[in-house]
Amino acid sequence: MSALLEVSGVSVSFDGFKAINNLSFQIGPAELRAVIGPNGAGKTTFMDIVTGKTRPDEGSVLWGEKSQNLLKMSEARIAQAGVGRKFQRPTVFEDQSVFDNLLMALKNERGPLEVLFYKRSRADDARVEALAEEIGLADQLHRTSGELSHGQKQWLEIGMLLAQEPRLLLVDEPAAGMTLAEREHTTDLLREAAKTRAVVVVEHDMEFVRRLGCKVTVLHEGSVLAEGSIDHVTQDPQVIEVYLGR
Amino acid sequence: MKRSFIANNPSVLIFIACLGLFTLGVTLMSEAFGTAVISTSFVKTLGKTLCLCLVAIAMDLVWGYCGILSLGHFAFFGLGGYMIGMWLMYARTEQIVVASLANAEIPPTAQEVTDAIGNQIFGVVGGSDFPAIWAFADSLAIQLALVVLVPGLLALVFGWLAFRSRVTGVYLSILTQAMTLALSLYLFQNDSGLRGNNGLSGLQNIPGAEAIPQSEISIYFFWASALALLLGYLLAAWVVSGKFGSVVRGIRDDEARVRFLGYSVEGYKLFVFTLTAVIAGIAGALYYPQAGIINPAEIAPIASIYLAVWVAIGGRGRLYGAVIGAATVSLLSSWFTGGQAPSINLGFYTIDWVDWWLVLLGFSFVLVTLFAPKGIGGLFDYLVRKGDAK
């Protein structure tokens, strides 16, 4: 099985500080992966590089069957190619309704003119409703999303990501600030999503990662320290020293 | 779920009704078609006000909806005015020259006529040759096309450079100020080809319409301005409703997030910036024939700042807010600075509104920003909510 995303030998430094140091990472087309690591390990920078926000100093990031070079593409093009990203803080468009938020994210033509002359089809309506059902916001469709609870905003954002129909989902600390019940729902959503696409979850919370039950990549000082099952990495002496031992 | 455009935008219907009644009212009170309650010059003021409302709508689109605080949109307004002004001045001067040469013993050659026109127009800046930019001044159709093309192309090039480099926020505002300042300084030069600080004048005289009195022409322009405002309002309302509006408001609130949804933010900004520049150009082309004169001072940086103030006071992010702001503030402004407002005698000091109006305006701007960030339009929200609560 060839990889969907192949990051190899990537390094980036900010003002002399090496945020990412010769990092290599691979993920298959339908895989759930957790990325953990202490603060400053380069988790967020890693996501910035994949989504095109930060350009690395060296290395390559290849995408899909055709091995497209993501480093040559703009953020918008990368997103269109199928990389979706969820930020740590829920960022939904607060003064717009849940419906409008989802509709905006729905996979469709993205050019200004196509959008200007866009007419909502029944299929699109149905799609938005199905998504709202999936994220448990079916009865909130016409509420302004700013009024939603923190957990609901997180789900709305996950729903927006799913609406984009990405082939790779990058999720930054999805469980932060969630109640136990909300966490369980989120775990289910992510596991479900990973059946048909690649999902990378960046997480601090070891309990949450254990619940995901997937392969784990441990980052430290900008490169991969260990990779394997959660039990494997938590027994790795190096991991214990830099991360768990603290 | 699906509703018609009007049903989704009830304010559009109210706006159409108000504008229609206003137009009818002014027509019935005008000197040309009614009871002559309001003077021709006031009809012109009102017509000009409608044009200012139109450019305010453009400003609201670009700033209130898309979040680009452009402080240069009056440059586009002025360019629209200059483009139509060139034809007005050329055609009118041509008539005068041809009439004066009609009695000459030898019929003048085409070259002599052109030279004489050039002399008339550019004598004031010490020249007589037509600069290259006047090449199409004899053609109304081409100059009308330029009303749209010149502001549109300038906005396209400027916007492409600025947005591509991800210039945002206050830096972009400064850049747009620099653009309008540079343009105004350039036009102030005598050899700019547009008569330097004299500008273009006599624009109220429409060539070919000498037989029609100004009182009537003023009403025609008033109607044209009202129609343009109506179309501009409908266009803007259509643009901001629906998915395009969602994306544009998304860009205003969180540009990076929209980018990660796969929308090319730069393309959208450029589209809105250029579209609004074109609207501003059209508004200017209708404004200056009513004003009669255009000069580079019109596009000084302060003009574009006023535009932002109107929209802020009226309430940005709502189209009727822009209209209310522009109409209220510009009419008040001409009332205060026109010397009609009664001075206030405090005994030791007399408040003369011609001098103090700007202070009052500045103060109201600060107050609105601090205490009513949604402007006058926010008042409507409040009233509607109150009505709903009952």
Image: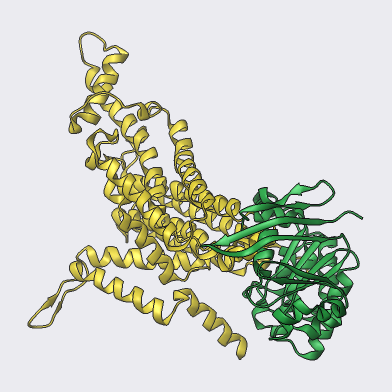
Chain colours: A green, B yellow
Horizontal side of A117 relative to B76 (left or right) equals right
- Quadrant of residue A17 within the rendered picture: bottom right
Relative height, residue A72 to residue B92 (above, below): below
Q: Position of residue B131 (x, y in %)?
A: 31, 27
The residue depicted at 68 percent of the width and 86 percent of the height is A246
The residue depicted at 34 percent of the width and 56 percent of the height is B43
Residue farthest toward the left in the current orientation of the protein: B348
Give the total of numbered labels.
0
Q: Position of residue B375 (x, y in %)?
A: 44, 75
Q: Nearer the viewer, residue A80 or B154?
A: A80
Split into 4 quadrants, where in the image is the N terminus of chain A?
A: bottom right
Q: Nearer the viewer, residue B46 or B364?
A: B364
- Quadrant of residue B360 within the rendered picture: bottom left
Q: Nearer the viewer, residue B61 or B174?
A: B174
Horizontal side of A35 relative to B276 (left or right) equals right
Horizontal side of B324 relative to A238 (left or right) equals left
The residue depicted at 24 percent of the width and 70 percent of the height is B357
- Quadrant of residue B195 within the rendered picture: top left
Horizontal side of A63 relative to B303 (left or right) equals right
Relative height, residue B282 to residue B68 (above, below): above
Q: Position of residue B163 (x, y in %)?
A: 52, 52
Q: Position of residue B2 (x, y in %)?
A: 77, 65
Relative height, residue A223 to residue A233 (above, below): above
Q: Nearer the viewer, residue B225 or B298?
A: B298
The answer, for residue A38, to whether it is visible in the render is: yes
Relative height, residue B77 to residue A172 (above, below): above
The answer, for residue B34, to whether it is visible in the render is: no
Residue farthest toward the front in the current orientation of the protein: A237
